[in-house]
Image (tube, helix red, strand yellow):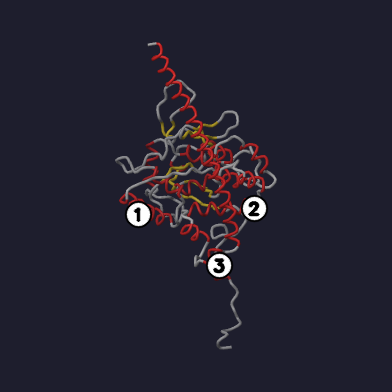
Amino acid sequence: MLDGGSNEIDRDVVIATDREADWKDLHWRLRSLAQQRVALEAEEVSYLLEAEETRLFRRLGYSSMIEYMERELHWGPHAAKERLRVVRELGDLPLIAEQFRAGELCFSAVRELSRVATAETEEKFLAQARGKTARDVERMVAGLKRGDEPGADPDPARIKKRVVLEVSIEVHARFRRTRTALDAERGERLTDDEVMDTLLRGSEQAATGVPRPAVQVAVTTCRRCRRDFVGAAGEQIEIARPTAERLKCDAEDIGDLESDAPTRVRPTIPAAIRRKVFHRDNFACVVPGCRATRNLDVHHVVHRKDGGKHSMSEIVVLCSGHHQQLHQGRLMIIGCAPDLTFEWRPDDDVETATTSPPWDYEDDPPDDRGDPRTG
């Protein structure tokens, strides 16, 4: 019995030893494949640069490098454009290109670093990226612009999040029709961000037809640095001050997140006033020429922080687009509702149809040169 038991134990030891060797071999093989994949991507990037410079695609009858990459290399249009962008950037980023070729950086990390690094800053960015995943690198450079140093304060307006949805053909068709209608209402093609903001507002309305405030969101303002954040997907995401002010302008306040005291949800603008303002402004944006009758907010002409009151003369209806423009300082509303004056302020000191007086043709000097056809 002892011999039998001893043999059984020996077999277990052998099996365990074999499995120990198997998982190490499996890990080695997977690591080898990963290194080969990165090496192939780096090699492909170098060939893509040469192909673009020599206009290889024209020899095969393609109109662009993107078309060539879609048909011959099986890249989607977005991926093809990103690879070409990286190809061009790496010409000015020799250190990042070298680590890419050596397999020290995967393409995803190279793609993110190439958005912000320059020849002067790439060494610092590489030091910060050491040991980080591609996702970590993406977060590290989020909100930075080209030329910024690692660790610089990010610009929240530059931070974008990618949303991928898979829907049925019917839902996709309805989405396309809805987007076309939204574009027609605004008079221009909306960005993806504007479309999603519009759709997320929802379609529920009170019996009176007056929509509820667009958001019930916790905008957290740091007491020390006064920066604004919203919580999403398990992380605190910084938002630009104009966006924070717009969100808090017409919303429902859920209370202090650091207080244990129970608080009731209360609108930033009394419901009774809000209802009357919507009826007075005919359920439409008050900005001259705006055709928006959906996705509407209520705004204080004089901001609450500057002493504005919940009075009919100081509150107007704005569409989400003009509301954002106002909080960004590109639009000014002056006066008492409904008698209001609107001033547009472009980014640069340029004349536009809204910032310069219209032509007064009657005051133009007469043209006494005569009709050139009659002499």
Contact check, label 3 and label 1, Cβ < 8 Å:
no
Residue type, label 1: Arg
Give the farthest residue toward the bottom: 374
The image quadrant where one finds the N terminus is: top left
Dot 3 falls on a residue whose secondary structure is loop
Q: Earlier in the sequence, mark 3 or mark 2?
A: 2
The residue where tag 2 is placed is 91
| Position of residue 136 measured from the top left corner of the image (x, y, whole percent) | 55, 37
Please tell me whether mark 2 or mark 1 is closer to you in this view: 2
Above or below, 374 relative to 351: below
Q: What kind of residue is marked 3?
A: Asp
Q: Residue at x 46, y 35 (%)?
A: 232
Identify the residue under disc 3.
360
- Residue that numbered label 1 is attached to: 177
Q: Determine crowd level at label 1: few under 14, some 14-19, many 20+ residues with C-alpha closer than 10 A.
A: few
Which one is in front in this view, the residue at disc 3 or the one at disc 2? 2
- Tell whether 71 sits left or right of 139: left
